[in-house]
Amino acid sequence: MSEEKSAHYSVTWQEEEYIHPPNDFVGQANLTDPKIFERFSLENFPECFKEFADLLDWDQYWHTTLDTSDAPCWKWFVGGKINASYNCVDRHLDKYKNKTAIHFVPEPEDEPIVHLTYQDLYRRVNETAAVLRDFAGLKAGDRVTLHLPMTPELPITMLACARLGVIHSQVFAGFSGQACGERIWDSESRVLITIDSYYRSGKLLDHKAIGDVAVEVAKKEGQDVDKVLVWRRYPGKYSSAAPVVEGRDFFMDELLKEYRGKTVEPVSMPAEDILFLMYTSGSTGRPKGAQHSIGGYLAYVTWMSKNIQDIHPEDVYWCMADIGWITGHSFIVYGPLACAASSVIYEGVPTYPDAGRIWRIAEELDVNIFHTSPTAIRQLRKAGPDEPEKYNYDFKHMTTVGEPIEPAVWRWYYDVVGKKKAAIVDTWWQTETGGFLCSTVPGLAPMKPGSAGPGVPGIHPVIFDDEGNEIPAGAGKAGNICIKNPWPGLMQTIWKDRDRFVSTYYGKYNTNPDSKDWRDWPYMAGDAAVLAKDGYVRILGRVDDVINVAGHRLGTKEIESAALTVQEVAEAAVIAAKDEIKGVVPDLYVALKPGFEASDELAAKISQAVSTVVGKIARPRSVHIVPDMPKTRSGKIMRRILASISNQTEVGDVTSLANPDVVELILKKVQG
Ligand code: WT7
């Protein structure tokens, strides 16, 4: 049975009822003008995006909104000159000098929260930029690899790079030395910026040692790193067992002593130059460096932060993602700071030391905008379903991002976390897209649990079948979701690999590779989706997440969602198990909410629920009730590992997981 990558299949998903955003929210929302979609209609493309660019301060105003001459590598706001660091820091000093820019919450609860004002941020970004320029010799266009965890030094270093026009490539701190080294090599960085240690789950982890491996790996590949700049979690005190390499490794806190009070003029950069690279995994081969521009990207995330995240400068905004992912770049650092918000950075794991931690932080800091992923929501619901009500905080707005959210989980988020007072946006987008593609506009449109919503203003989605025919809204058929038009936040290309960029995102639906007309280049996201009659998009998951059982294509999310209708179930993951007769069959893993015990009756009940909700064809081969799901450090369930367990193949290296020990337990349970 083939497991071809196709998104075209029928869906049997029941439509959910609308829920209207609370009046208090709508009353204060930034965007409530119903004419917005008219202003951003395709007739007004691309000039409508001037509204995005006008949220920024330009050193030199641009002359061409969109240049298509190198299609599909679009150029936005051509002729403009701008500095991203200036827009996120300097321009706020007049009005907000003494307002908090960053609230840093260390994981150990007895370490005080650090409040950095915009003035503090200005000083630290300038001094850091001085070190990067005058000590490390970095200049505009150079690449530098950052391998930093969630402390303020990460956004400070990013903004210092941006100030100089230096291209940062931040590698998620949970990634191994091998992964970091490959990215140093691909980006040709000769400087690595890291930290000695940081806290996760109550332990001070040795991080510098991983940087040493990364430098070795990069060297073997052919890229020499001549300077490693090391922040210290506790300035003045080195908390790592790794040796300090003479002439290569330098402590940032020591270097900075020479640069006290130093200011660095923001370098005026062409809008189309590169702000950063963000590596993301493709389906095969080496990671792709998504290349994001300065002007277009910053304009895009600023508009989205203001209008979809509804950020006002008075707001305390907390996005729980890691800055090592695109969500953190766009919606912890660049977007919120360009809007002069106070942005929260939390170092550790959400459930440390207990399931109330997140809500205590929210209460203490008066967080009123909260942003996280379905995985984190499921985790928090599992660890402490009644915790939120014990704390006195009020969210006006909440976001879910990263995966489809099951309606049952959405309802817990809305009722319990949001206390029925917060508008929710389910934002669908990707590393490649810079910012949101589909979401409701929270002050304008009702929410529908489990659906992301229509295209955001300026984004025009379309669903194609495999032959390139448009699947009409309300047809009840899934297909490949594409975006008809370019937009300023879209990556410019894959770093050093234009061919891969063109073939991955445009290869399937572009019919004239020489065309300079943007209409010939729909962007293919690689997700399967269904479009309801009302224009709301429901994302079913990556095209590769489709399971083809005896010729019937099933979305893993449909099955997982069905399992989650069973009250005892906290998390569910479906994988394709090899089957002699049917090719593959779904195998279901579930974790229970606290207080529930695994039993054969419960497994049968879950299996029955899948049959009832999706159909007999989707009935799992077995229901494995496991203590926890194997997860990455960013919280994604590692379905690949579950699949190897079901299929009795080599599980491989699990040391980079957040919970490697659980793999052994699941193996015993499933394979005996
Ligand atoms: C993939 C992109 C978006 C930034 C974080 C992840 C899935 C993302 C949603 C959503 C359903 C979603 C898609 C997409 N995804 N948001 N709201 N509903 N699925 O970025 O690592 O580049 O992953 O995440 O499958 O293609 P990423």
Image (cartoon, rainbow, N blue to C red):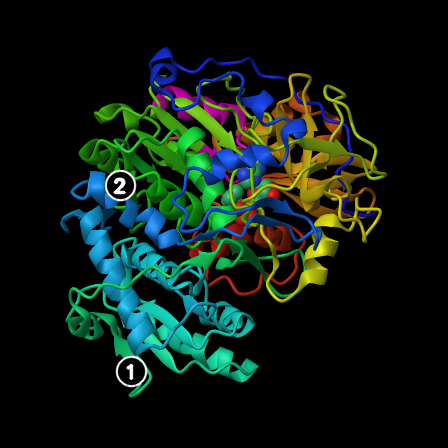
**Front-most of 237 and 350?**
237
Q: Position of residue 654 (x, y in %)?
A: 50, 61
Whether residue 351 is situated above or below residue 160 in the rendered picture = above
Q: Quadrant of residue 344?
A: top left
Could you say which is closer to the camera, residue 603 or residue 618?
A: 618
Q: Is residue 96 above or below residue 167?
A: above
Q: Quick check: 51 left or right of 527?
A: left
Secondary structure of the residue carrying tag 1 is: loop
Question: What is the span of residues highlighted in magenta in the rendered image?
Answer: 400-416
Residue 591 x, y percent position in the rendering: 48, 38
Q: Which residue is mark 1?
A: 243
So how many labels did they put on this image? 2
Dot 2 crowding, Cα within 10 Å, few <14, some 14–19, many 20+: few
Question: Gap between marks 2 and 1, in whole Å?
Answer: 35 Å
Residue at 22% x, 59% y: name it. 124
Q: Earlier in the sequence, mark 2 or mark 1?
A: 1
- Residue 459: quadrant of the picture: top right
Residue tagged 2: 354
Q: Which residue is pictured at 47% across the width and 25% down the height? A: 410
Residue drawn at (31%, 42%), measured in percent from left and top?
351
Name the spot of residue 327 as percent of width and height, x first: 45, 45
- Disc number lying in front (2 or 1): 1
Q: Is residue 410 magenta?
A: yes
Q: Residues within 10 Å of mark 1 (few under 14, many from 20)?
A: few
Residue 423 in which image quadrant: top left
Give the left or right position of residue 667, taking residue 614 as reference.
left
